[in-house]
Image (spheres, grey):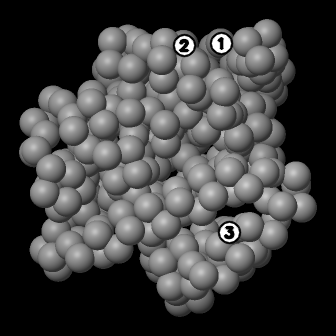
Amino acid sequence: MKVRYLLLVALGLVLGVGIPLGLGGETLLQVLGGVHATHLAGMLALIGLAWNLNAGRVRLLVGGIGARQFGQGEALAVVMATEFAICATPGGAGGPPTYSYLLRRKGIAAVDGLALYTVDQLLDMVFFLTAMGVFLLYDLLVPSELHLGWQLLLLGVLLMSGLLLVFAVVRRYRRLLLFVGRLLRWLGVGARGRKRVMRRLLEYRRGLLEVGGFSAWRLWGLYASCTGHWLLRYSILYLAVREVGGELGWIHAFLVQMLSLTAGYATFLPGGSGGAEVGASMLLLPHLGSAQAAASILLWRFCTFYWYLIAGAPVFVHLAGGPVWRQIRRSMVPGPVAGR
């Protein structure tokens, strides 16, 4: 597993950097040379602000189940370590065990930690579905050359699938348990293993129901922090394009990121490397020169992927370290993280 994982990381880095370099050609360095260090620092500052909004979301979630309240610094450390684990593992598989482990260190049961992580992801999906509806309405009312119909339909289907799965866990759990039991039996899982999975699903559902009892002000606070986080994070590509002298609408840049990252996670490489760069290249080239597109992609990925690894690694090592990493490697089952 260790050798295979290292090969995946190496392949991801080669593709992640090599694709923009090949696309940009000889003029890429010249375009990157025009990037102002203060502007790059400003984009990283937006990422830091987005992390702090996510930390606020952690505090609201933890407070909602009656656990000991986190300080902002503690919650920020949880966010940075979890984001590192998401970016460093195929399909973001390291996110849930890291999040659950860090909350367990604060006295929160593992199943409650996983339930909170799912609610965190659920909020993301609700935000993106709302954004898709707003963008579709904008496309219908304001004449444009984007023709967003198929992009919005694809993303909407993916997001609705995730929401329906959560709905099945909460409202149709008996049918889901029967289906999962038959599937596990067909896969050759023994009775003890099936019971363990069923027990986890029931505990998981209990945690989700507990979160469902949050007050209205807490739910609105969670959604507001979620919205602020994604608006900041998904403004990075728009700013990167402007920094290299290109022109691209904010909505278009938002959709480029969503589609590219969704394609990237299908590659099952850490951080969606390769797929994200190819997807972004295809969507940006009709509007930018090759060097501008490549430079924009490198700036965007540095701020929203490589910086997450650089800044999050020491936090992850300090708070989680070897035990969590070994758990991640043993249970690494790729699965997309919406919009990441």
Q: CA distance from mark 3 to mark 2?
A: 38 Å
Query: CB of mark 1 within 8 Å of CB of mark 2?
Result: yes
Q: Quadrant of the N terminus?
A: top right
State the residue in front, 232 or 66.
Answer: 66
Pointer 2: what residue? 33
44 left or right, relative to 32: left
Specify the label residue 158 is tagged with.
Answer: 3
Q: CA distance from mark 1 to mark 2?
A: 6 Å
Does 231 appear above or below 4?
below
**Residue in the foreground of this view, choosing between 266 and 71:** 71
Residue at image point 80% right, 51% down: 189
Residue 45: % across, % down: 28, 30
According to the image, label 1 marks what residue? 29
- The residue mark sitting in front, 3 or 2, is 3
Q: Is residue 288 above or below residue 120?
A: above
Say which residue appears at 38% left-offset and 68% top-offset. 206
